Image (tube, rainbow, N blue to C red):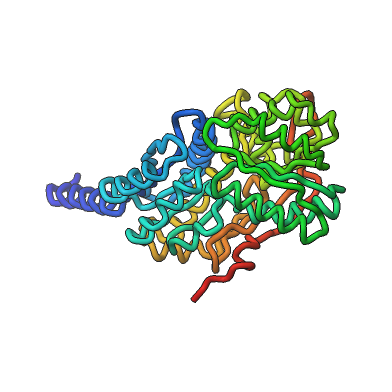
Amino acid sequence: MTSRFGVVTLAAAIAAALAAASASAETIKVGVILTYSGPAASLGDQIDKGMSLYIKEHGHDLPQGVSLELIRRDDTGLNPATAKRLAQELITRDHVNFLAGLIWSPNALAIAPLSAEAKVPTISSNAAAVNLTRLSPYVARVSFTLWQECLPFGKWAATKGGFKKVYIAVSDFAPGHEAADAFSKGFKDAGGEIVDSVAIPVKDPDFVPYLQRVKDAKPDAVFVFVPSGKQATALMKAYSDLNMKAAGIKIIGSQDMVPDEELPNMGDEPLGVITVGTYSNAATRPANKAYVAAWKREYGDKTPPGFMSVGGWDAMAAIFSAIKATGGHPDPDKVMAALAGWKNPDSPRGEIMIDPETRDIVQHIYIRRVEKVGGHLANIEFETLPMTKDPWKELNPPKN
């Protein structure tokens, strides 16, 4: 028979345990700034789905008593002022522990100084501006830089691709110019000739007159960078309408030109297009096959995962790792120390790590060709440039 004293003691013990559990429980808030509306909403959807899928597949990996809350905000597109305001609200009102997402480089560049001032670890899932990580010691990147992709691609195009004369056509904003500069340096250093270049407006471009200038110049190929998504499809249509393939002008570029999720909308025109990138959902790596299978279970076959989705997945992998390394109490400086040199051998894109010196990603870069596989277009990786760092930072060391 249990005494009254025993009942009281047991009740007190339970109450104390519940109080301790409550005290140890912590909700980690991640402010996610992406484009959820407008013409580029598909880009935000890709990253958001990648983040959400990682949480569903790995939520059990968080320390006991720790939960994660995503606070989503819509930057509406390329809009630095809006992105900065949203970041300020997330920091001061919502008291987020992390910022993540960031599609557009100008938006990310506007946010970076805030992360430094408030000491909020910020993970870029896509924004590729080379100087982003230099603007704040609290920014790390799990995406790529255009220099990381396009400088070695320029060398490859001249030495292995068989191209002698190339015209450059890129969108008129920071990533476009960085892609052009990087490809041009790699191509010219390897003996190639840049015939000419043109910058195309970012907002609602009509690609036909710009590609007509390319066609009139009669290069071997045109190197292209435009924002991933619907603009890539529109440019490919203009290339087709001008019959440039029949004119012997090949199209080459970064992975933004033929994103996996847009290939079903492009017809057969992209067949043979060679690009450089960090990911293809057609890759046979076991981690990628598992990722694609999980994506299909969760989202079906209507929209396949592309490189931006993997940017969302890997951002969450980095955040989870930092949370675990800090015991569920993500002190900003301890988080950044945990991210310095962070490695993930099982990303869908292959092995990745964060350079402890630059907080930029180090990863395999793939040369890919669009081919038809099983009746569908796919980016087939046929050459790998292993564990490539961002060369811009090596070419432009910090000024002390």
x and y percentages locating residue 107 in the rendered image: 44, 46
Front-lying residue, 267 or 311 = 267
Number of dots carrying numbers:
0
Rendered position, 325 above or below 69? below
* Residue 10 appears left or right of 238: left
x and y percentages locating residue 373 in the rendered image: 79, 29
Res 253 quadrant in image: top right
x and y percentages locating residue 356 in the rendered image: 55, 67
* Residue 18 appears left or right of 186: left
* Residue 307 appears left or right of 374: left
Is residue 174 in view from this perspective?
Answer: yes
Front-lying residue, 29 or 94 = 94
Res 271 quadrant in image: top right
Rendered position, 97 above or below 172? below
Front-lying residue, 196 or 47 = 196
Please report the residue visible at 59 percent of the width from the left and 57 percent of the height from the top. Answer: 361
Please report the residue visible at 79 percent of the width from the left and 26 percent of the height from the top. Answer: 243
Rendered position, 55 above or below 147? above
Please report the residue visible at 68 percent of the width from the left and 52 percent of the height from the top. Answer: 149
Is residue 161 in view from this perspective?
Answer: no
Please report the residue visible at 85 percent of the width from the left and 52 percent of the height from the top. Answer: 160
Rendered position, 69 above or below 91? above
In the orientation shown, which residue stands out farthest toward the bottom? 400
Q: Quadrant of the N terminus?
A: top left
Front-lying residue, 223 or 197 = 197
x and y percentages locating residue 340 in the rendered image: 52, 65
